[in-house]
Image: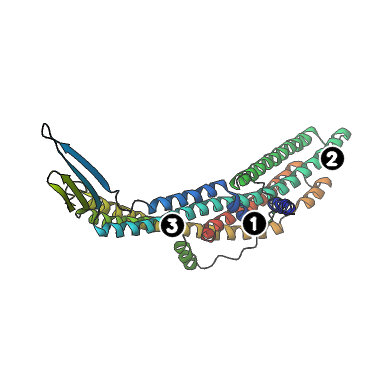
Amino acid sequence: MKRTILIIAACLASFGSLRAQESIDEVLLLVEQASKELQAQRKLTEAQKLEAKTGNSLENPSVEFENLWRRPVPGNNSELTVTQPFDFPGAYAARNKIAKLKASLYDSEGAEFRQQLLLQAKELCIEIIYLRQQQILLGERLSNAQRLSSVYKQKLETGAANILETNKISVELIAAKTAANLNATTLKTRLQQLSNLAGGEPVNFTATDYPAESELPEYTTLETLYMEQSPELQRLADEHSVNLKTITLNKALALPKFEVGYRHNYGLEGRFNGLLVGMSIPMFENKNKVKAARAQSYFSDTKLQSAKLNNVTILKQLYEQAQTLRRSAESLQAVLRNQNNIELLNKALDAGQISVIEYFTEVSTLYQSRETLLQLEKDYRTATAQIYRFEL
């Protein structure tokens, strides 16, 4: 019975991984679950956090035994010494705090890596939708060129068309086939790249339209969310906090170290027991370490402030770019609604109202405008994906 249940569960899991991912969010969920890179990053973060917890224990105790003898007079003298060195107490508190800060730093690094990977997957999904829409347009262009080629070959045989017109259509047919084949190849490559991001799992992403998306809110609202939830800025802030606490640690390490222990001596004069207390003054070992830590802290703070300025600049550019792309796409859509469509141009050509040259001039302009519209929509979606990366 248990074996049957396991087989059914495995089949359901397999069916779940093979079913179509109809939305970008479903693809991102699959990538997050199956990505080998993300799995490796999680293990690395776990190892780094465990390593950060080590190194704050007491040093190993030291045990020494001495046995001295003398000749020719019989007799010997033995001594056992057990010592335990330790740093100034403040050093242990500083190391403990640094370990916690480093754990936060490694989590931020993992979150930044995850966001970059999911953004890459989302941009691939956007490009795949664009390529599918482009394939539909190129398929329409190819179908139209094939129809014209067939019609004008018959006209050439009957003398109703000349060789120049037929050659012009043949060139268009070759160009349409090439464009459609290249687009199909690029689409196949992008789907494979998406599968690679998902750890080689099959990604059956079937969407042909972009998801519904509301207009961008006010810039100040976006900037606040973008800056507050940026894993890059959080990583740099954690890095600065670690460097600040390292200053405290190096100050504590510049204070004396202590050593306590037990000594047992046995010789001709009897047995002696006693305590051992020592102190080590770090006059040379930690020279300039505090200065170096301060310099590192200044560097990390400067890097954090610079990253904040860069993030604001990039966000402003993306926001303005997205607004421009949206307005351009809306304007072009309005123009295309008023342009002559392919069907009307075909009727005019068949009726002899326009020449082949005039026909292809109009058709090329129309297809180019529609391709430009697809590109504008794709670029707009890519820009908004980068703006809303903090939601990933």
Checking the image for residue 26, the label placed there is 1
Is residue 244 visible to us here? no
Question: At which x and y percent is residue 233?
Answer: 42, 58
Disc 1 to disc 3, C-alpha distance: 28 Å
Question: At which x and y percent is residue 390?
Answer: 51, 60
From the image, which quarter does the C terminus lie in?
Answer: bottom right
Asked if 152 appears above or below 382 in the picture, the reply is above
- Badge 2 crowding class, 10 Å Cα cut-off, few under 14, some 14 to 19, many 20 or more, is some
* Label 1–label 2 contact, CB within 8 A: no
What type is the residue that disc 1 sits on?
Glu
Asked if 360 appears above or below 384 in the picture, the reply is above
Q: Nearer the viewer, mark 1 or mark 3?
A: 1
Looking at this view, name the residue that lies furthest to the top: 72
From the image, which quarter does the N terminus lie in?
Answer: bottom right
Asked if 175 appears above or below 45 in the picture, the reply is above
Q: Mark 2 falls on what kind of element?
A: helix
Disc 1 to disc 2, C-alpha distance: 46 Å
Asked if 268 appears above or below 50 in the picture, the reply is above
Q: Mark 3 falls on what kind of element?
A: helix
Disc 2 designates what residue? Answer: 151
Q: Residue at x 79, y 52 (%)?
A: 344
Is residue 364 visible to us here? yes
Q: Mark 1 falls on what kind of element?
A: helix
What type is the residue that disc 3 sits on?
Asn
Question: At which x and y percent is residue 252?
Answer: 24, 56
Question: At which x and y percent is residue 260?
Answer: 21, 53
Disc 2 to disc 3, C-alpha distance: 58 Å
Q: Residue at x 21, y 49 (%)?
A: 288
Checking the image for residue 373, the label placed there is none
Disc 3 designates what residue? Answer: 311
